[in-house]
Image (cartoon, helix red, strand yellow):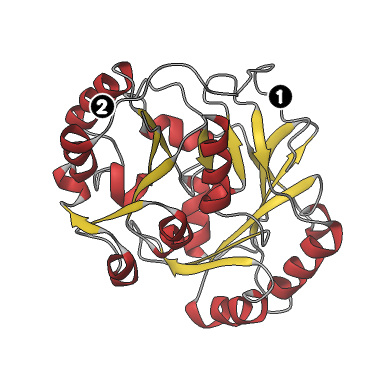
Amino acid sequence: MRRTLYLSDLDGTLLRSDAKTSEFTNRTVNRLVDDGVLFSYATARSFETASKVTQGLDAEMPVIVHNGAFVLDSVTRRPLWSALFKEEEKEEIYRAFTERGLYPLTYSIIGGRNRFSYLWEQSGRGQREFICSRLDDERARMIFSPSRALEGDVFYFTCIDGEERLRAVYERLREKYRCFFSRDIYSDEPWLEILPAHASKASAALHVKELFDCDRIVCFGDEINDIPLFEIADECYAVENAAPELKEIATAIIPSNDEDGVAHWLEEHAEFTPTGGGKEERGAENDFSAPSE
């Protein structure tokens, strides 16, 4: 029997517009997973925020976070795969921002802990709103000098600001790194994300596929950062509210996130997989000391 890995994006796809999974989605996915369906998610969120908005889901599978920068064990939170910037790369990227008066949030592993660093005074309104929504996050790290922004092993940059300035940075870096320039689906603010060139939901998904000896990938998404994942999947489904670019390459269009399109599709079509065969090993909880590609 073939083994299929089902992967869903979160925001705008598995989550409803209130940024939560519905009771129907939770109940359906949990039942299917209990019966043997291999299901997980691939998101631009961190594990910390993703776990909050998916509290009703009980699947204990590796999860893909930060747009593919990490594959984490969902129980121990130990990195199973990661993509990090080299020293010269993170310096080049940060300089591209600061030369235009922009100071992005930098995500890094510092002292074995997952942190994001920000300069409050240099952040614009949209970025401050983003920071304020995460002030209770144990990863939040206010710094007071740009010289401290690149401490640790950096794996992700994100910046919310004016479209013109962000686009200039995007055009400068997009050929060398994995860049996503879009608008936030909740605030509609211009948003630029930058990851290492080899980091993507696609590369992370292939790693999870290998971990579980799967034969194929079926995925679900709504935004342009899902395009790499759609391109390597055997089947790919865009929700009705998805970006036109994603719909163009989708196997088919399914009902929107607010109609629980993913859960309804899984309930009707998902294939059960015999237990066993996975290669993953659990490690010490919260150990970020050895993420590696």
Looking at this view, is 26 or 141 the one in front?
26
Q: Callout 2: helix, strand or loop?
A: helix
Q: Amino acid at mark 1?
A: Asp
Image quarter of the C terminus: top right
- Callout 2: 10 Å neighbours few (<14), some, many (20+)? some
The answer to whether residue 170 is visible is yes
The answer to whether residue 190 is visible is no
Q: In this image, 174 relative to 110: left or right?
A: left
Coordinates of residue 59 in the picture (x, y in percent): 39, 22
Looking at this view, is 173 or 209 the one in front?
209
- Please give the residue where the numbered disc 2 appears in the rendered image: 26
- Callout 1: 10 Å neighbours few (<14), some, many (20+)? some
Residue 292 to residue 160: above or below: above
Q: Answer with mark 1 or mark 2, whichever residue precedes in sequence.
A: 2
Coordinates of residue 268 in the picture (x, y in percent): 15, 36
Residue 5 found in image quarter: top left
Q: Amino acid at mark 2?
A: Asn
Q: In this image, 257 relative to 37: left or right?
A: left
